[in-house]
Image: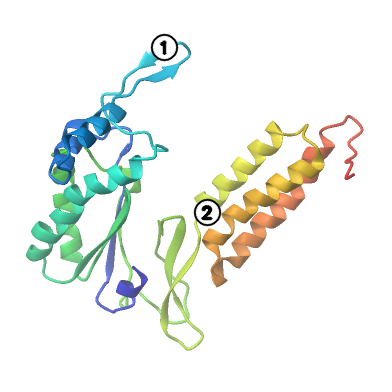
Amino acid sequence: MRRVVLSDRVQYVYEADIRGFFDHRDHAWLLRMLALKVGDPKILRLIRQWLTAGIWDQGTVTRPEAGTPQGGPLSPVLANVYLHDVLDLWSANVVRPRLRGTAELVRYADDFLVLFEHEEDAERFATDLPPRLAQFGRDEAPEKTRRLALGAHAWRPGRAATGSFDFLGFTHRLGTSRTGQMVVVRHPARKRVQRFLREMKAWRRQHMRDAPRDQQRMLAAKRRGFSPYFGLRLCYPALEKVRTQALRYWPWTLRRRSETRRATWA
């Protein structure tokens, strides 16, 4: 995506989100797509059984009629198979030949955006996408769908960019390098950072009575798992904020263990 944006042929970004993608994926369409790629009926039968496997909840068994578990081992693979037919092939074989300029679809699992050279192409795609999704019983989330200018025409050297978008946990915006060139600046999305801090807070409350050494070991492991993904030079301020807040609020959790409000570090 960064390479395409800096190629001077992309001026607009169409950002969209499929509402309830993992929860409402149609089993019949998914199995039909798999049958075109998998010739072994035993494999197809196993996948069908996995899709309709019962869920035990408080003594009641329910069998899903649509969707796949978002944390399931097969869900990412099935998502790629499904969206390859719904979006990838449709975009390459139907949409792109009718456009005036360049268009690039960038997708990772169910997260995707489309880069356009001309605004009218972006408008046409925005008009054609909802009917395409409706064919498979899906629709867009309007609150997460938008179009913005992002390219050489929108870039102002030395000035802060006015438009940005989030993709795969990063906020992307145009910036200026030290040599005066246009660059794509990436830093952790605010929602991603806030979600991680909420998860840390919930874990500290749940494990308040654990030994301080065990808490420190687990909190450090959680932060190490978060930081490498955002290990870019411009991400360091956000990562330092996460580290600072983790160090600031952990002693508060320890002080709440006792009515004397004194933390024991031994």
Q: Residue at x 34, y 77 (%)?
A: 6
Q: Residue at x 80, y 37 (%)?
A: 211
- Closer to the camera: disc 1 or disc 2? 1
Residue 137 can be seen, yes or no = no
Indicate left or right for 186 with 154 as reference. right
Residue 38 in percent (x, y) is at 17, 43
Q: Quadrant of residue 43?
A: top left
Question: Badge 2 local density, few (<14 within 10 Å), some, or many (20+)?
Answer: some
Question: Badge 1 local density, few (<14 within 10 Å), some, or many (20+)?
Answer: few
Residue 130 in percent (x, y) is at 18, 45
The earlier-in-sequence mark between 1 and 2 is: 1
Indicate left or right for 223 with 141 as reference. right
**Tag 1: amino acid:** Thr
Residue 107 can be seen, yes or no = yes
Residue 182 in percent (x, y) is at 40, 80
Q: Residue at x 26, y 31 (%)?
A: 46
Indicate left or right for 199 with 86 as reference. right
| Mark 2 secondary-structure assignment | helix
For the N terminus, the quadrant is: bottom left
Model colouring: rainbow
| Mark 1 secondary-structure assignment | strand
**Tag 2: amino acid:** Arg
Residue 34 in percent (x, y) is at 18, 41
Q: What residue would you read off at disc 1?
A: 60
Indicate left or right for 115 with 168 as reference. left
Cα–Cα span, label 1 and label 2: 39 Å
Q: Residue at x 71, y 56 (%)?
A: 244
Looking at the image, residue 248 lies above or below residue 95: above
Q: Quadrant of residue 173?
A: bottom left
Q: What residue would you read off at disc 2?
A: 190
